Image (spheres, grey):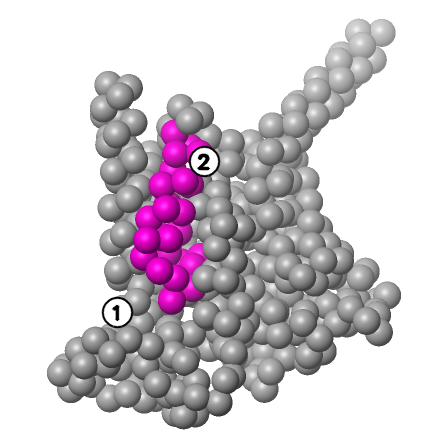
Amino acid sequence: QKRIMITVVLALIPCMLMAMFNTGYQAFLSVEQGGTLLDSWQAVAYGALGLEVSSTSVLGCMVYGALHFVPILLVTFAAGGACEVLFAVVRGHEVNEGLLVTGVLIPLTLPSTIPLWQVAMGTAFGVVIGKEIFGGTGMNFLNPALVARAFLFFAYPAQISGNVWVAAVPADGHSGATWLSSYAEGAGHLPGHTFADAFLGFIPGSMGETSVLAVLIGAAVLLLTRIAAWQTMLGVLVGTAVTAIGLSSIGSTTNPMLNLPWYWHFVLGGWAFGTVFMATDPVSSAFTSTGKLIYGFLIGFLCILIRCVNPAYPEGMMLAILFMNMFAPLIDHAVVRANIRRRAARYVRSST
């Protein structure tokens, strides 16, 4: 189990690097448009390091992004670790490495400007309610990282979404909202960048979810080491494409999301990150091969359904995965029962 956890963390390294770079990149883009750095102490520290405040400076963007990402990462491990130790002491068990992956996933699903006390609360909620009350690592049926993000989304929507996606406050009032939010709110177009920008991750969004390229590198690691199930990923891909193509063929004059080209869903929001690192969680997903395909397909279907039918919540991936986490055991049960009936019928035919 420890090897699996370490491998998943290694697969997340490209997303962590991109999280730090893009946070700084988005902030400096805003500064170049007339904005100011969010925190004065960070501006002072940045100047003391002699680094260039420019969106073209890779090192400059990385350092500024690290000033936001690393504190969130440390608070996540501190809060989650405290909960793990408390439950281990009460139960008389050793502290396991279950928080290793969850502690990295949670910061990557959050915006760079979220208050640290909310990070601590969300992490504690995700670890305790999403995992520990069911018996700890390996016993949970919900993904703890998604439980933490869902708690923060519904408890503190102003800090988890909307106009807080970049670490700078533009003087001209430009919101910096995600492309999905802008499109769903009635813009009817994607703001000024290309499909390549979205694929590479040079867009506003949760810190680790913007770059599909970084996610694909992680996916290759998980698939080559056979830690993640390709059936789940394929199911999500097919479910997303079929549903998006069907809804986009209908179109709408009042709902912009129905007019979004189907292939854009793959590079916007947390679709790629959720497909590779959340939906494939071996504990909370389906176990049978056929069940994984069905499970993944329904996640893709629900994600697009939520995005398009309820434009007030344009993301969809988080709720789709959490909803299907609850039905994964039922899917496996149905698949196993179908196999038993099929084998029983084959045995009867061979006997006669």
Which quarter of the rendered picture does the C terminus lie within? Answer: top right
**On the rendered structure, is 334 left or right of 227?**
right
Residue at image x 58%, y 73%? 179
Q: Position of residue 310 (x, y in %)?
A: 72, 58
Name the one closer to the observer, 235 or 328: 328
Q: Position of residue 160 (x, y in %)?
A: 47, 60
Q: Residues within 10 Å of mark 2 (few under 14, many from 20)?
A: many
Res 252 label: none
Q: Position of residue 280 (x, y in %)?
A: 51, 44
**Label 1 sits on what residue type?**
Leu
What residue is shown with label 1?
67
**On the rendered structure, is 303 left or right of 19?**
right
Does dot 2 land on a helix, a strand or a loop?
helix
Name the one closer to the observer, 22 or 46: 46
Which quarter of the rendered picture does the N terminus lie within? Answer: top left
What residue is shown with label 2?
130
Residue at image x 25%, y 54%? 74
Q: Is residue 159 magenta?
A: no
